[in-house]
Amino acid sequence: MTRLVVGLGNPGPEYTWTPHNLGFHVLDELARREGLIFGPAARLEGWTGRRDFEVARDAAHDALLVKPLTFMNLSGRVVAPLAAWCGAAPSDVFVVYDDLDLEPGALRIRPHGGAGGHNGMRSILSELGTDRFPRLRVGVGNPRTDAARHVLSELSPAERTEAELTVAEAAEALAWWLAEGDLERCMSRFHSRWKERAAE
């Protein structure tokens, strides 16, 4: 059974280094670490469904790294058919996304939960019909005013430097999960590390 690691974001160069695209960046870093290259959906052998996503196949861990290109609000329309095609249980679909409720640089892994106001997660929850899938939340902070403008605004140079460090840490946790397959141990191992870093 193939696992899916899904990073959420919006397509287009104008969104590249915005908070809303950190899920894409985590997957790019994970692919770099694993020596994988993203390509168009048309290159996914055996797949005959919709093609608005990029994918990298991780044969060593029997996994697909997926970046939906539907725009955030329709992410579930890519994820659900791919999960069904792969025979992946919800617990084998790991979603990475930005979270307004966490401070910039904070990371949290959860085995399940609601959308928390995130439209990409809301779409996936709706299309999968369950909330019982793991997720890695990447903190982007909450401006308490115009949240949409905040997540779609380009990061400053200082913010981007911090985001790149956070992306690297998130990718390390996903690489560990792919290799070991134990979500509880992954949470214990990396939450302890992240807590220590935050206290420094």
Image: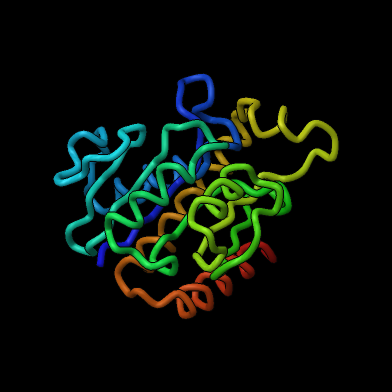
Task: Left or right? Give the position of 153 relative to 120.
Answer: right
How many circles with numbers are drawn on the protein?
Answer: 0
Residue at 35% in and 74% down: 181
Q: In which quadrant of the rendered image does the N terminus lie?
A: bottom left
Quadrant hosting residue 52: top left
State whether residue 70 is above or below residue 61.
Answer: above
Quadrant hosting residue 142: top right
Residue at 26% in and 53% down: 34
Q: Nearer the viewer, residue 122 or 142?
A: 122
State whether residue 71 is above or below residue 173.
Answer: above
Residue at 80% in and 38% down: 143
State whether residue 156 is above or below residue 60.
Answer: above
Task: Left or right? Give the position of 27 relative to 61.
Answer: right
Q: Nearer the viewer, residue 93 or 87?
A: 87
Q: Nearer the viewer, residue 177 or 9?
A: 9
Residue extending farthest right: 145
Expressed as whole percent of the image width and height from the top left, the position of residue 46 reads 15, 46
State whether residue 131 is above or below residue 127.
Answer: below
Q: In which quadrant of the rendered image does the C terminus lie?
A: bottom right
Quadrant hosting residue 44: top left
Residue extending farthest left: 45
Residue at 38% in and 55% down: 5
Expressed as whole percent of the image width and height from the top left, the position of residue 116 reads 70, 53
Expressed as whole percent of the image width and height from the top left, the position of residue 157 reads 59, 29
Expressed as whole percent of the image width and height from the top left, the position of residue 76 reads 48, 46
